[in-house]
Structures are given as structure tokens and as C-alpha cells.
Amino acid sequence: MAFRLAPLVLLTAGSLLASNLACARPSTLPNTGASTGIGQGAALAALPPLRIVSYNIRHGRGMDDQVNLARTTGVLRRLDADLIGLQEVDDRVRRSEGVPQADSLGAALGMHAAFGAFMPYQGGRYGLGILSRFPIHRRTEIRLPDGNEPRVALAAEIAIPPFADTVVAIVVHFDWVEDDAYRYAQAQVVAAALDTIRHPVILLGDFNDDPASRTLALFRARAQELPKPVEDHFTFSSTKPDQEIDYIFLRAATRWIPLRAEVITEPMASDHRPVVGLIARRPRGE
């Protein structure tokens, strides 16, 4: 079956996201190396879960104040993800040696890459990235209301052939200041976009807000959060974690199942800790 694409459009506060893609069913399964481990039943065991990572990489600048993208690459390689959402990504910026970081990480990990720009910065651009083990068929920058810096959300249509399905991944990095007015305005635009998408959606990133905030309530009303362990749910900072501000959500009707998320101890590569989530696809016919 051929792909049929309706365009994803650039979004502003007054526009909505449209998406329509059909994909064929191939015969192989991804080698994720993961198992659900939480008793979802034999039916789910037939299809390995997808490993999803959200990571604010701080343009590769570690807690030693050195930009070292090879170190970031090593962290991501160990996480062995199928889909990665990256925040604070440089593209040909002087402070990070002019490297197109999303493309460079994708090439090193053998993954497809997409970049979304917030703004020009030091001769290049600064923004977000998506890496995918599966081909990215369309990328879209969803323009958000400006806060203390310009902001976009980065959306990508990704066909996942082993599951005969397509998902839309949306990566966010909302405004960071204590007053949540800018942050909530940005979240409202993303929430409006979610309401228009017919495919399953994986929403992930640095929300810069705590679990009890109205920002998080907005998304919990529309999607399922991948739960983190109660005893280890803080994602910032990487050296003295005491805040939970990075999340993974799944909006998928009944076709996909959120399993769990874990926060990874990595105290050097960035000021955030990476979040790893597992989601499973129900076999067809169930």
C-alpha cells in the first residue's frame, strides 16, 4: 500500500495540525532488546515495546562545562532507543563548534534525524531534535507564542512498519521562568494541535513545570502519562535531582499502551537526567 500524505502545516496560535498517512505491513520486528516486565499478557509479548527517550542535552555541555557531543552520543547509545526527543540542540552554532548536532547524533547512532529551530544563535540555530530508528516522513515546526525566548514544538510523522502503524512524535521545551503565563500559553497551542491529530501521538520533552501544575493537567486531560517510579521520579538537576519537569505522554486511543518510564542516573553529560519510556502496540484484531 502506498503512503498517502496530507500536509502537516505550520501552526500558530490560531491554526490546527492535520495529518493523514497509511502504511504497509512489512514482515520484520524492531530489535529493541526490551521487555514489558509488568504482566501486560502474552498478547503484548508478541510485539516488543518501543523504547522512547526524552533528554535535554544542554547542547552537549556537561557538568564539567565542556561541550562534548561524543559523550552525549555515548549516553544515547547505551539507552538503545527507537525514538528520541532532544531539547537544547544546537545547529551550526559557534559555542558547539559549528556542528549540526541533530544530524551528527543521528549519523553516529544510525538513526533518522529532524531539527526544529527556535531562533538564530551565534551564526547557527538553536532548538529541538528528533531521532528515530524508523524513517521520518514529514517534520513540522509548530510555532508557539514567544516567551522569554522564541519557541516551537517539533512534530514528526514516523511510520513504524513492524507495527503497520504511524505515530506523530511531538517534542516540546516550554518557557522556564517561575511565572507560568508564557509556559501555559505555549502548552495550550500544543494541546489544540493534539486535539486534531488522528494518529497515535507521543508527546515528550522538557515541560519546565511540576506534576501539580495546570500545564501538566492540560495534557493529562488529553493523553496518558508514562508513570515514573515514585522513589525515583526527579529529572532535574542531574547532580542533585529535586524537580520533575521532563515527561513522556501517549495519546493513542486503544491501539497503543503506555507501560512505564524510568529516570536514568547520568550526572555528567547534561544538567537534566534522561527519561526512558516503554510503550506497546496491541496486536491487530484485539
Image: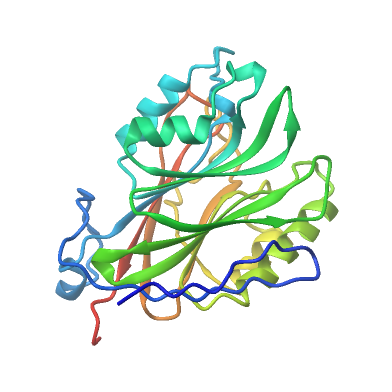
- What percent of the width, then of the height, locates residue 277? 39, 53
To which quarter of the image does residue 118 belong? top right
Q: How is the image coloured?
A: rainbow
Residue at the limit of the structure toward the front, as seen here: 2
Residue 126 in the image, given as x and y percentages of width and height: 67, 34
Determine whether 13 is above or below 100 in the image: below
- The answer to which image quadrant residue 21 occupies is bottom left
**Image location of residue 61, percent across then percent down:** 56, 20
Quadrant where the N terminus sits is: bottom left
Residue 114 placed where, x, y %?
51, 45
Q: Residue at x 27, y 69 (%)?
A: 163
Q: Quadrant of the C terminus?
A: bottom left
Instruction: Decide which of 47, 239 is in the foreground and name it.
Output: 47
Image: 132 above or below 193? above
From the viewer's side, name the closer residue of 64 and 137: 137
Residue at 25% of width from left, 59% of height from top? 36
User: Is 263 or 240 nearer to us in this picture?
Assistant: 263
**129 shown above or below 210:** above
Which residue is situated farthest in the bottom direction here? 285
| Quarter of the rendering containing residue 15 | bottom right
How many marks the image carries: the answer is 0
Q: Image point 71% across, 58% down: which residue?
A: 213
Q: Is residue 35 left or right of residue 214?
A: left
| Left or right: 205 as drawn, with respect to 258 | right
> In this image, 146 relative to 121: left or right?
right
